[in-house]
């Protein structure tokens, strides 16, 4: 049996997924409880309401987990010790004024 250590990125992904699906459960619960746009009443009145709720939760969980993982990854390299002289400014773009260039055009012959 192999005793390999789980990479940190996988741990971060699993935590982000769990947190995203937890947030999705809270979100779906709030939508159902407050009956936003009549969705709660529609799902509760349906004979496949449990399946609709499950699908609603899973699809929102996928989105929320992706957002959580993106936020964690994008904020990984940022620390308080980073002193960037540019402060988010980009290199200046030098624009040139357009110059009119004459193009010779033959006149159409009259018939």
Image (cartoon, rainbow, N blue to C red):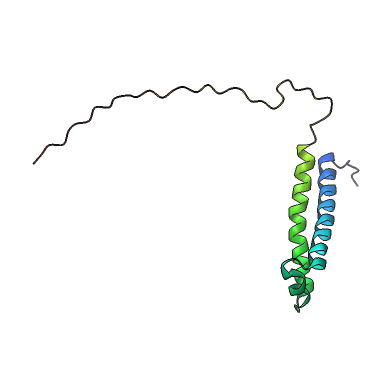
Placement of 16 over or under 85, stated as above or below: below
Seen at 80% across and 59% down, the residue is 27
**x and y percentages locating residue 76 in the rendered image:** 80, 35
Seen at 32% across and 24% down, the residue is 101
Placement of 55 over or under 62, stated as above or below: below
**x and y percentages locating residue 51 in the rendered image:** 77, 71
Seen at 80% across and 41% down, the residue is 72
Task: Work out whether residue 26 or residue 12 is closer to the camera in this orientation and state it.
Answer: 26
**x and y percentages locating residue 93 in the rendered image:** 55, 23
The picture quadrant where one finds residue 106 is top left
Placement of 50 over or under 81, stated as above or below: below
Placement of 30 over or under 94, stated as above or below: below
The picture quadrant where one finds residue 80 is top right
The picture quadrant where one finds residue 41 is bottom right
**x and y percentages locating residue 3 in the rendered image:** 91, 43
Task: Work out whether residue 19 or residue 34 is closer to the camera in this orientation and state it.
Answer: 34
Q: Quadrant of the C terminus?
A: top left
Left/right placement of residue 37 relative to residue 95 reads right
Left/right placement of residue 1 relative to residue 91 reads right
Total numbered badges shown on the rendered structure: 0
């Amino acid at each position: 049996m192999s005793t390999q250590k789980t990479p940190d990125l996988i741990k971060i992904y699993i935590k982000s997924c769990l947190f995203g699906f937890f947030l999705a459960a809270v979100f779906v619960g709030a939508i159902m409880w407050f009956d936003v746009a009549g969705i709660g009443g529609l799902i509760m009145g349906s004979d496949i309401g449990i399946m609709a709720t499950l699908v609603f939760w899973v699809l929102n969980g996928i989105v929320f987990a992706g957002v959580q993982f993106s936020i964690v990854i994008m904020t990984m390299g940022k620390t308080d010790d980073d002193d960037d002289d540019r402060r988010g400014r980009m290199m200046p773009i030098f624009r040139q004024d357009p110059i009119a260039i004459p193009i010779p055009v033959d006149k159409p012959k009259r018939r």
